[in-house]
């Protein structure tokens, strides 16, 4: 069994609330979050799969933890705009953590989704990072491309958050899995807020095994689905993005999905 704990911690490190247990715990925190608050998730068994819910308004996150201690910063102000407005609000908060079931670890699934992804080196995977995020704004952060939200017909505040490239021709985004996975399908939801948006007609998918595939896209609201040669990888990169011949300078990525199984 894994010994688990969920802690609500203030900006000065003070413990406001804590629940402990084995293998599965549910916490109900009675209190209003303030800037600086964090959620701490602890286990005595890292290098394992867990299912964590950081807020009752959000999906569970199926994650691989490489550390025994994980910190999740409660978003406020500008950083909150890319989240459901109901999240982290009010006086009662539902937070859960459990070890993943065996069938969850062995089944075919979408491997890139992580609704609790944040900036930095979180020790919580999958994790998205990029060499550019438009103006450093939360609504254009790399994490938006793996948060599970696929609404792509507008841009800006939730549910239209996306990864924005600030007009950079050399923009690239990486999704790290934190462990080896076997993949065979990739799906790209490009942002489709036409005529505000441009779109990509070509991109390169590079894999940690040293291989790469060039993919073609078109102007579409629908997802671009690519079957790739089955391979074992620890990360993938989307780069060499070629825009369409269109007046708009604003292509963007709403979501990247990667399908397969844990290796």
Image: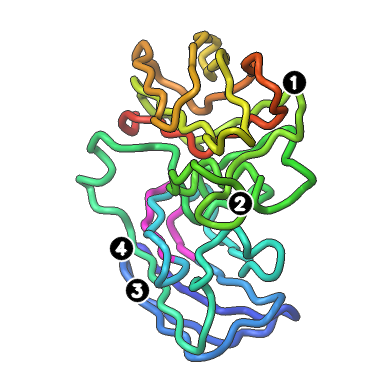
Q: Is residue 217 visible?
A: yes
N-term-proximal mark, 4 vs 1: 4
Which residue is labeled 4 in the image? 1
Which residue is labeled 1 in the image? 169
Residue at the image point whose x is 46% and y is 29% from the top: 188
Residue range corresponding to the magenta coloring: 42-53
Which residue is labeled 2 in the image? 122
Outermost left residue: 103
> What's the distance in space between the residues labelled 3 and 2, CA to CA?
21 Å
N-term-proximal mark, 2 vs 1: 2
Indicate whether 174 appears above or below 49. Answer: above
> What's the distance in space between the residues labelled 3 and 4, CA to CA?
12 Å
Question: Quadrant of residue 170 in the image?
Answer: top right
N-term-proximal mark, 3 vs 2: 3
Classed neighbour count for the residue bearing mark 3: other residues with Cα under 10 Å, few (<14), some (14–19), many (≥20)? some
Q: Nearer the viewer, residue 42 or 257?
A: 257
Which residue is labeled 3 in the image? 25
Q: Secondary structure at mark 4?
A: loop
The x and y percentages for residue 150 are 43, 44
- Residue 94 painted magenta: no
Residue at the image point whose x is 37% and y is 22% from the top: 225
The x and y percentages for residue 5 are 45, 73
Instruction: Locate the C terminus by quadrant.
Output: top left
N-term-proximal mark, 2 vs 4: 4
Majority SS type along the magenta span: strand
74 left or right of 224?
right
> What's the distance in space between the residues labelled 4 and 1, CA to CA?
49 Å
> What's the distance in space between the residues labelled 2 and 4, CA to CA?
23 Å
């Amino acid at each position: 069994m894994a010994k688990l704990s969920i802690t609500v911690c203030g900006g000065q490190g003070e413990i406001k609330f804590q629940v402990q247990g084995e293998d599965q715990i549910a916490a109900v925190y009675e209190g209003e979050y303030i800037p600086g608050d964090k959620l701490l998730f602890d286990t005595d068994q890292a290098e394992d799969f867990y299912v964590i819910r950081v807020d009752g308004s959000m999906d569970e996150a199926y994650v691989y933890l490489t550390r025994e201690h994980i910190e999740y910063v409660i978003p406020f102000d500008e950083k909150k705009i890319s989240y459901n407005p109901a999240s982290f609000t009010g006086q009662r908060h539902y937070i859960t953590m459990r070890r993943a079931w065996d069938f969850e670890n062995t089944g075919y699934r979408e491997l890139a989704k992580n609704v609790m992804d944040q900036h930095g080196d979180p020790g919580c995977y999958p994790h998205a990072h990029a060499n550019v995020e438009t103006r450093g704004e939360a609504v254009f952060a790399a994490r938006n491309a793996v948060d599970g939200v696929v609404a792509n017909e507008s841009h800006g505040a939730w549910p239209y958050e996306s990864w924005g490239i600030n007009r950079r021709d050399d923009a690239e985004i990486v999704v790290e899995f934190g462990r080896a996975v076997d993949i065979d399908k990739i799906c790209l939801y490009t942002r489709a807020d036409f005529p505000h948006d441009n779109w990509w007609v070509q991109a390169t998918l590079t894999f940690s095994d040293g291989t790469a595939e060039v993919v073609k896209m078109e102007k579409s609201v629908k997802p671009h689905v690519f079957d790739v040669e089955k391979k074992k990888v620890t990360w993938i990169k989307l780069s060499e993005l070629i825009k369409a011949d269109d007046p708009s300078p604003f292509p963007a990525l709403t979501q990247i999905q990667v399908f397969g199984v844990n290796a």
